Image: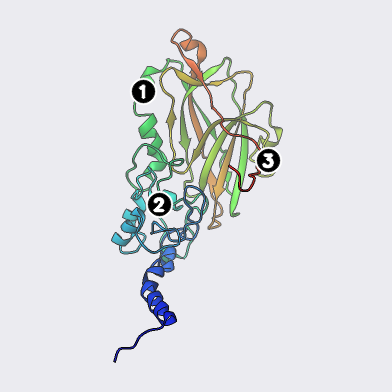
Amino acid sequence: MKKWLGLGERAAVLFACALPSLISAHPEYMLAIPNGDKVIDPSGNPWPGVGHERSSGGGKLSPFGLDFREAGYRWTQELCQKDSDCDGLSNGEELGDPLCQWSEDSGELPQFDVGITHPGIADVERSTAASSSGPGASVAMKMDTFTCANFKEDDLPSDYTSTSFIMPSYEVPSERTTYTKYAMKVDDGEDMYAVRFDPVIDQPELVHHILLYNCDYKPDDFLEPNTEASMPCTNLVFAWAVGGASFCLPPKLGFEFVAESPWYLIDVHYDNPNSISGVKDKSGIKVTRFPKPSVANEGYQSASYLWVGAGLDTVRIPPRRE
């Protein structure tokens, strides 16, 4: 005898059939990758279904999801070093494990747990145009491969020099996160052009990003490394973060280092989720420079930054209006 199902019963059957696809996101997989619970898309929206094209999970797998499945649903060296979404950043860099050291069984936190991005959705803002090779290689190669491929010291004036802005064997605090600033004076007798910037990363397991500033006046509070006083310098010269590396300017361009403004400051962000103590750091930025008069007749031009945006405190969008 056939039994006809009522509307409520039919709905229950349909829900039961759909249930496997609804729960197929496997939330336990978030624990199998570093920072799986902190992934956001390029717009800043949380993405708990990391391996899927739908943020809530279920349905079609993302490029990272396909690679994760191929890796046996485990965080392996190969998966860490792979760039699943082809945006120039390895999966490890996007998930806070750029050196590919983390494992689910270790019980330790990943190297970094800030700045986490989606390894299955290309992030245009963070991406670089070069590829990497080897664990953590892009930290020292990506931008270098792209922008410095044709850079030759033999093409520079004979009086070029390298100036290092680095931490003075600074003992990194064991606190969760620290922003440490340190100032130094550069005694140039004449204006200089800077044409290459190289990160000097002494403790890659702790250094998350570095900013180099020029100061309008002597920053007295920062003649020794300081984590307390407010930032006195606002003229950004160069910035590095995990996933970036050396930067070379195109021919006939240089950033000016003005002799009348001799004070510079580096601001280093240390991310220390594992509370490592007793580590001394000498990270910073090395800058290749030469005197402007050395190229006075070679058509050099000064490079600068273009800041685009609107400094609005609030924005009000009226309802139901175009």
Question: Label 1 sits on what residue type?
Answer: Lys
Q: Which mark is residue 216?
A: none
Can residue 247 be seen in the rendering of this structure? Answer: yes
Q: Nearer the viewer, residue 210 or 28?
A: 28
**Residue located 47% across and 11% down the image:** 294
Q: Which residue is mark 3?
A: 313
Density class for disc 3 (Cα within 10 Å; few <14, some 14-19, many ≥20) is: few
Hey, which quadrant is residue 5 in on the image? bottom left
Which residue is pictured at 41% across the width and 19% down the height?
Answer: 251
Seen from the viewer's position, the closer of residues 201 and 80 is 80
Distance Cα–Cα, label 3 vs label 1: 46 Å
Foreground mark, 3 or 2, reads: 3
- Between disc 3 and disc 1, whose residue precedes? 1
Question: Which of 135/202 is in front?
Answer: 135
Quick one: label 3 or label 2, which is nearer the N terminus?
Answer: 2
Location of mark 2 (residue): 119
Q: Residues within 10 Å of mark 1 (few under 14, many from 20)?
A: few
Q: Position of residue 90 (x, y in %)?
A: 38, 48
Is the C-beta separation of discs 1 and 2 under 8 Å? no
Q: Amino acid at mark 2?
A: Pro
Q: Quadrant of the C terminus?
A: top right
Q: Residue at x 37, y 60 (%)?
A: 75
Q: Nearer the viewer, mark 1 or mark 2?
A: 2
Q: Residue furthest top?
A: 297
Q: What secondary structure is found at the residue carrying circle 3?
A: loop
Q: Which mark is residue 152?
A: 1
Q: Is residue 209 left or right of residue 138?
A: right
